[in-house]
Amino acid sequence: MKKRWHYDFPIGKLWIVEEEHAIIHIGFAGEDRSLAGYDNAETPLIKETGRQLSEYFSGSRKDFTVPLLLKGTVFQQSVWQALREIPYGETRSYKEIAVGVGNPKACRAVGMANNRNPIAIIVPCHRVVGYDGSLTGYAGGLPIKQYLLDLEKSNLQRNYFFYGEKEIEHLKSRDPILGEAIDRIGKINREITSDIFAALVKSIVGQQISTKAQTSIWNRMRNGIRPMAPESINHLSVQELRAFGISGRKALYIKDMAEQILNGRVDLPALAAMPEEEVCETLVRLKGVGVWTAEMIMLFSMQRPDILSWGDFGIHRGLRMLYGHRKITPRLFSRYKQLYSPYASTASLYLWAIAGGACSELTDRASAKADNARI
């Protein structure tokens, strides 16, 4: 049975319809009559879709992870898949889509398939424009299409951990030594991944390999698994996951993580309401996820403001260099965490920068042996 529910967004009311545990329709106000035969029910999947749409409109989400069920002809399916591959903040012409689906003369047919797209925004038909860049028809109306394009354009450079004057002034008032380093280093932009599941997969992929190798494998996975969601992973075998370049153990970790989420043993949306300790306890139940990974998820996915990781070598090195210590003891670490709180995450950004040489006159007094020792 089809379930429907609606939410209010900056562009007005949007209807979300679920069938067979997948989203089959997202449409605009005025569709009440055409959806009259569906049950009114705010299912967990519909609620999660509404949450992800809210994040999209706030500028913190660029990709969606909810499962979709697109019903249409083979040609329509190919067009809708091509729409999903248009990057956030970019546009394509009907001609470019036609070429992309292997039928350069099918511009009119592409337009018709675009017009019949059943899942607005997530399947971004608003990113298709005329050959000269002009706006063309849109189910929600041209003002809404322009709004969505402007929204994405304005948010293109905002996918960074957010901090501002409040956090900086607090840290500078509590610690003049760190404050001086902040003034010298300036604003730090660290990218975030708002999708927690994708961030967890990426973290497992990157374990014990170089950053270059992680980037290469992760790009292959993001291009080959759409959407990057537990449902998509669940349909892949271990061998298919290994074909992206990861080890068998990592493939098993990722498969197990998807299963834990799908069966409800780990509720990712519920993490938002949990304190840090509970988030950590929940995430470390997943195979391949330790305390450090959980802390990085809290910082660079959930944007929790008060994370200072004891298990991070860069944080230890930054503290040693900034304050002239040979070793950071648990007592010292606790003192600095208390000093930075409630904005230890922002302090972490600067400690990592210092550890990387942002203040060239600062040196690490620890021996190489101590630096490489386990924390």
Image: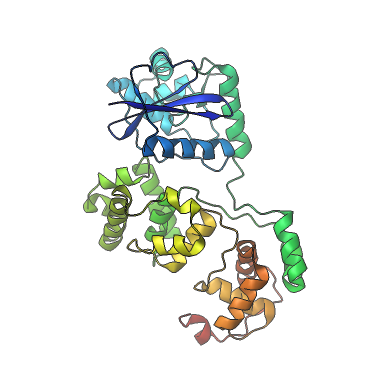
Q: Image point 62% across, 65% down: which residue?
A: 344
**Residue 272: x and y, percent?**
49, 51
Horizontal relation, residue 149 to residue 207: left or right: right
Asked if 238 appears above or below 227 in the picture, the reply is: below
Asked if 290 appears above or below 89 in the picture, the reply is: below
| Quadrant of the image occupied by residue 317 | bottom right
Q: Nearer the viewer, residue 25 or 206?
A: 25
Asked if 201 appears above or below 149 in the picture, the reply is: below
Q: How many marks?
A: 0
**Residue 271: x and y, percent?**
45, 53
Q: Image point 52% across, 82% down: which residue?
A: 371
Determine if residue 340 is in view.
Answer: yes
Q: Image point 55% across, 81% down: which residue?
A: 330
Determine if residue 105 is in view.
Answer: no
| Quadrant of the image occupied by residue 352 | bottom right
Q: Nearer the viewer, residue 284 or 184?
A: 284
Q: Nearer the viewer, residue 273 or 217?
A: 273
